[in-house]
Amino acid sequence: MTATVPPKAPTFLGLPTAPRGVGHLRGDQSFPDAARGALRDGQLRANLGHATSTIRGKRARVVAELPDWAQLREAGRALKAATMARLDDHLEELERQVTARGGVVHWARDANEANEIVTRLVLATGASEVVKVKSMATQEIGLNEALEAAGLDVFETDLAELIVQLGDDQPSHILVPAIHKNRAEIREIFARTIPGVDPGLTDDPRKLAMAARTHLRERFLRARVAVSGANFAVAETGTLTVVESEGNGRMCLTLPETLITVMGIEKVVPTWRDLEVFLQLLPRSSTGERMNPYTSTWAGVTPGDGPQEFHLVLLDNGRTAVLADEVGREALHCIRCSACLNVCPVYERAGGHSYGSVYPGPIGAILSPQLTGVEDNASLPYASSLCGACYDVCPVAIDIPSILVHLRAEHVEAQQRPTAEGVAFKALARAMSNPRLWHLAQRAGKLGRLLSRGRPTLPNALPPPVSAWTRSRDLPTPPRETFVEQWTREHRGGRS
């Protein structure tokens, strides 16, 4: 009798990316489709233009104060590169130090695991409410939705995040999630959603802030559980760091009995000396300040002071896959300052929602596709003019334009079916490798002079499939003579 051998399960040889169906890394539309709607919104473009230009100006002034800014920037770049090279060692040291100080470390391979861990920890406390510090990582994994599905009430405490939450909206900027809203729109949201708000509430910024403070103060005082992110984690001491401008973060980090921090694994720095560099780079590049108004640090648990239970969730969610790419791994150097968004001409016009991810702008165009797999966000690497302004302002010198080109190449190579553009370039490559074909192509190209009718460029309204190219590009009118023809004529005429 012959035994039946069950078929062997296929072996996954790659590195896992962020799972589908959970979190906020993939949009429902491609970037071009989403951007078309945003470009038709005049109020949105006005809000973005005003806000980004204001932040750009503040940043430029405080950066100009430092004569050694270039050296500080290079130090940040070098520290990030060195940390990524030994990331596993630093994370293990961080775990040891957090544990030694009374904290508990959890490792989450993806968004599903992280959400399950945090939900389980909150339910174990018996609490029904959670207050949150602004956190990109928890937005990335869709933690709010997971907690609410478990019957928990979740309250964002950052002013801009509160605006987005109350308005049933999505963040559109890394630093200022509600950058797409003006004061009048914020007043309308508060008047409609905050119970007991003053019916005479105006759009004065101070009045709006006071209304938010009154709304949140009660929740701070009764909260038993808080969830935070982390800007940095110091491996040598197990210290977590959160920087913010409003003080809401410190309320969440000190008042509740239980604190749960969700942190991407790339946020670790080896030593306190390293943290010193980033605490100079981050505030100047993000809010245009010399230092953050509130810089909170904590390590584990201190009896009788602050939360008496601390959990650190270390999140991968595709980051190991990014680390494996020798070119793309620079995206993990990002310290979430948002300087690249504020100088990007594409972001300023299209807004953050067009990117379909919690990470918008130039950094999102290189980070999101790598976390999800390029084909799940194939349009984002093309959401750039490659002007290089993002690289110029990045405080850790991430070469965003080079990574964009690298990811575009990955997308092209992944195509199974030939595209019109691919066929055209293959034909061009063949012609350029054969002198006879190349000369024939140059002669045929002169027919374009008939279409130009004396203009310096060909008309944009050419028939398909060429129209897809010329819709956003100018094609110069072919010259009367090619270089070879001109050189031959002059050479035969006796000119040197």
Image (cartoon, rainbow, N blue to C red):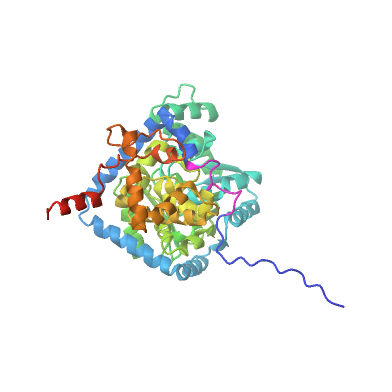
Of the pair 308 and 335, the residue shown nearer to us: 335
Number of labels in the image equals 0
Q: Residue 162 location in percent, x, y?
A: 49, 38
Quadrant of res 444: top left
Q: Is residue 21 magenta?
A: yes
**Residue lying furthest left:** 495
**Residue lying furthest top:** 200
* Point 37% across, 59% down: residue: 433
* Point 47% across, 42% down: residue: 31
Q: Is residue 399 visible?
A: no
Q: Is residue 346 visible?
A: yes
**Residue lying furthest front:** 492
Q: What is the magenta segment's predominant secondary structure?
A: loop
Q: Is residue 381 above or below residue 164?
A: below
Q: Is residue 101 above or below residue 349?
A: below
Q: Residue 248 location in percent, x, y?
A: 45, 44
Q: Is residue 256 magenta?
A: no
What segment is highlighted magenta in the picture?
19-31
Q: Residue 299 location in percent, x, y?
A: 46, 61
Of the pair 291 and 346, the residue shown nearer to us: 346
Query: Could you tell whether 152 is left or right of 339 in the image?
Result: right
**Residue lying furthest bottom:** 1
Of the pair 80 and 276, the residue shown nearer to us: 80
Q: Quadrant of the N terminus?
A: bottom right
Query: Could you tell whether 82 is left or right of 32 in the image?
Result: left
Q: Residue 45 location in percent, x, y?
A: 39, 32
Q: Is residue 409 above or below residue 174?
A: below
Query: Could you tell whether 446 is left or right of 192 in the image?
Result: left
Quadrant of res 131: top right
